[in-house]
Amino acid sequence: MFNQQTPACDQITTISNKLILIFPDDIFGYSNIGACNLMNKNFNEAINWFKKAENIDDQDPIVLSNIAYAYMNLNMNTEAIEYYEKVAATGDEQYKSFALQKIEELKK
């Protein structure tokens, strides 16, 4: 989608806010704004946006993984583990494997 080299978060946020207005029950606008906040290391703000997406779809492994990642970067390992456990429970085998690996790393 986009990465830290992308200077377009302002434009992505503008477009995503419009998506939210038009499609308030779609996770993508919320998730995109959350991702921009992750890239800018605004982890608390990212969590706020990803939790809005989670309220719409609490089974989306990408949203859940991003919440876990943000918590991990805030050194909130208990919360990160909680969300990686959700990923392991809801994602496919690849997500499950990834989440279990992260849980193991966080428990060290």
Image (cartoon, grey):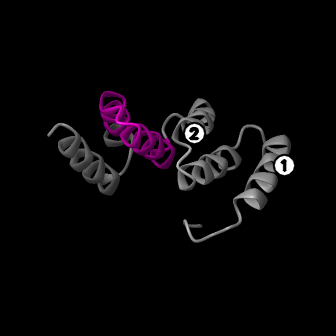
Residue 64's x, y, as percent?
A: 46, 41
Which residue occupies the foreground of this view, 7 or 79? 7
The amino acid pointed to by label 2 is: Phe
Query: Relative to 83, is 31 above or below?
Result: below
User: Which residue was labeled with disc 2?
Assistant: 50
Find out whether residue 99 is within the magenta segment: no
Type of secondary structure dominating the magenta stretch: helix
The magenta segment is: 60-86
User: Which residue was labeled with disc 1?
Assistant: 18
Q: Residue furthest bottom?
A: 5
SS at mark 2 in the image: helix
Q: Is residue 71 left or right of residue 81?
A: right
The amino acid pointed to by label 1 is: Lys
Residue 51's x, y, as percent?
A: 57, 33
Which residue occupies the foreground of this view, 20 or 105? 105
Find out whether residue 79 is within the magenta segment: yes
Q: Which quadrant of the figure has residue 72? A: top left
Residue 54's x, y, as percent?
A: 56, 34
Q: Residue at x 81, y 53 (%)?
A: 14
Quote the CA–CA distance across marks 2 and 1. 17 Å
Q: Residue at x 41, y 45 (%)?
A: 69
Image mark for residue 33: none
Q: Mark 2 vs mark 1: which is more N-terminal?
A: 1
Give the crowd class for mark 2: few <14, some 14-19, many >=20 residues within 10 Å: many
Q: Which image quarter is the C terminus in?
A: top left
Q: Is residue 87 left or right of residue 8?
A: left
Q: Which quadrant of the figure has residue 89? A: top left
Q: Residue furthest left?
A: 108
Asked if disc 2 and disc 1 are in contact, CB closer than 8 Å, the reply is no
Which residue occupies the foreground of this view, 53 or 4? 4
Give the crowd class for mark 1: few <14, some 14-19, many >=20 residues within 10 Å: few
